[in-house]
């Protein structure tokens, strides 16, 4: 039987009802991290679990946002240089990609790495995305497998592009300044008209550092992201991980001027700051606290092999010579990967290692590990 694609209005109505039930079961209040998890990952209904188009360069494709692999194949081809070095350095032949999206990055890596990769494992919770990935990667089908959870132990090179930003975060709100303010956890309730609304509760939770200033302050903590890193550290016996995402080190993340938090939604290539409407029809993200991720890795026994901007990383891996051979229009598109006001500065790359430490070439110049 042919699958029936749900209409957007029926999809969001069903998801809304499901989340309302969860709020009721929790006593009428649900922490934002749980709300975000349900909005994104509820089977068949959540944003990443339904059939809507997500990845694409232009709004007329029905997509919501573009990631680097969709922007230009040079992204994956350049990342492949680093992944290839890591495979050789760690004596492994398997790549593990988390959240493979459209499959564009997997295709670029597999095409570039050839026989260096004997198996490519995609860890993805989305059944609809898995079908699209299988169609795109048919030429490499003999190397591919899909899993929805990591085994107890594994080895290889882990790649995660824009994965950490989609992991649920806790929202913390300070009412008042540093001296007299009281911290609350921000959660979601059902309003009298049936819509979702914010509600704050006093909490013992705190950001990892004190935040100066007299103003109210909204921010996030990343327990699930840190848990993901600890799981990697616990199970990766030999290999490396390269995590690319937008975010900051701790001092910049919790800067007094960043008082509105970083939670952001994406729909139809437009950004907005309200995750409580159009639930299931738009992406919900938060910037990454890379200091927290690095500390979680170190505490769990992994080495931090490098941390730098995406611009430095890709240039170190040889992006510029690859760009020289492109037509002007494609060169201009590829330049967005490294331009400061595009993806070059906001996006960072964190490299983690299991086993003996070594020096990845992507961090040869511009390593910022000391600033974490």
Image (spheres, rainbow, N blue to C red):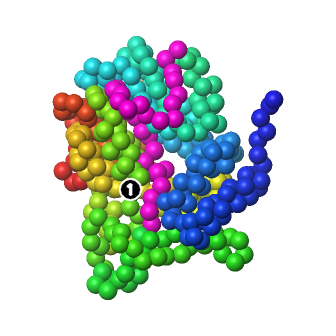
Find disc 1 in the rendering and name its residue.
223
For the N terminus, the image quarter is: top right
Q: Is residue 297 left or right of residue 123?
A: left
Task: Inspect the magenta stretch and tell me whether residue 151 lies in it.
Answer: yes
Q: Nearer the viewer, residue 79 or 280?
A: 280
User: Looking at the picture, does residue 73 appear above or below residue 216?
Assistant: above
Residue 217 visible in the picture: no
Residue shown at 71%/71% (left/top)?
Answer: 194
Q: Nearer the viewer, residue 12 or 56?
A: 12
User: Looking at the picture, does residue 212 appear above or below residue 24?
Assistant: below
Q: Nearer the viewer, residue 132 or 208?
A: 208
Q: Is residue 360 left or right of residue 223?
A: left
User: Looking at the picture, does residue 252 appear above or below residue 165?
Assistant: below
Label 1 sits on a secondary structure element that is helix
| Image quadrant where residue 238 sits | top left
Q: Whole-percent x and y of residue 77?
A: 42, 27
Residue shown at 64%/36% (left/top)?
Answer: 128
Looking at the rendered structure, the number of numbered marks drawn on it comes to 1
Residue shown at 32%/73% (left/top)?
Answer: 256
Task: Inspect the magenta stretch and tell me whether residue 160 lies in it.
Answer: yes
Q: Which residues are magenta?
A: 142-171
């Amino acid at each position: 039987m042919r699958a029936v694609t749900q209409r957007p209005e029926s999809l969001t109505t069903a998801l809304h009802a499901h989340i309302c039930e969860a709020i009721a079961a929790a006593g009428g209040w649900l922490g934002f991290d749980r709300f975000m998890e349900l909005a994104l990952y509820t089977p068949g209904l959540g944003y990443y679990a339904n059939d809507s188009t997500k990845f694409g360069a232009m709004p007329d494709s029905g997509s919501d946002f573009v990631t680097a692999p969709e922007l230009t194949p040079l992204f994956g081809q350049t990342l492949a240089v680093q992944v290839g070095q890591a495979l050789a350095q760690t004596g492994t032949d398997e790549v593990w990609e988390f959240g493979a999206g459209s499959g564009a990055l997997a295709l670029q890596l597999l095409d570039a790495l050839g026989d260096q990769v004997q198996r490519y494992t995609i860890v993805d919770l989305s059944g609809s995305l898995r079908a699209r990935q299988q169609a795109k990667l048919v030429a490499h089908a003999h190397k591919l497998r899909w899993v929805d959870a990591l085994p107890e132990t594994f080895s290889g090179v882990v790649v995660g592009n824009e994965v950490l930003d989609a992991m649920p975060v806790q929202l913390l709100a300070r009412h008042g300044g540093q001296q007299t303010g009281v911290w609350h956890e921000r959660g979601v309730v059902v309003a009298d008209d049936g819509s979702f609304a914010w509600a704050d509760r006093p909490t013992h939770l705190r950001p990892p550092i004190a935040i100066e200033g007299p103003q109210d302050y909204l921010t996030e903590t990343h327990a699930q992201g840190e848990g993901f890193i600890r799981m990697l550290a616990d199970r990766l016996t030999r290999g490396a991980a390269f995590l690319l995402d937008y975010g900051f080190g701790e001092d910049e993340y919790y800067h007094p001027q960043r008082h509105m938090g970083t939670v952001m939604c994406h729909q139809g290539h437009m950004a907005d700051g309200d995750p409580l409407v159009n639930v299931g029809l738009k992406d919900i993200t938060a910037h990454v606290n890379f200091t927290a991720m690095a500390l979680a890795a170190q505490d769990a026994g992994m080495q931090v092999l490098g941390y730098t901007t995406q611009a430095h990383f890709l240039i170190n891996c040889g992006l510029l010579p690859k760009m020289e051979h492109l037509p002007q229009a494609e060169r201009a598109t590829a330049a967005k990967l490294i331009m400061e006001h595009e993806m070059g500065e906001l996006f960072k790359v964190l490299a983690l290692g299991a086993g003996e430490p070594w020096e990845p070439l992507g961090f040869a110049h511009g390593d910022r590990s000391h600033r974490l």
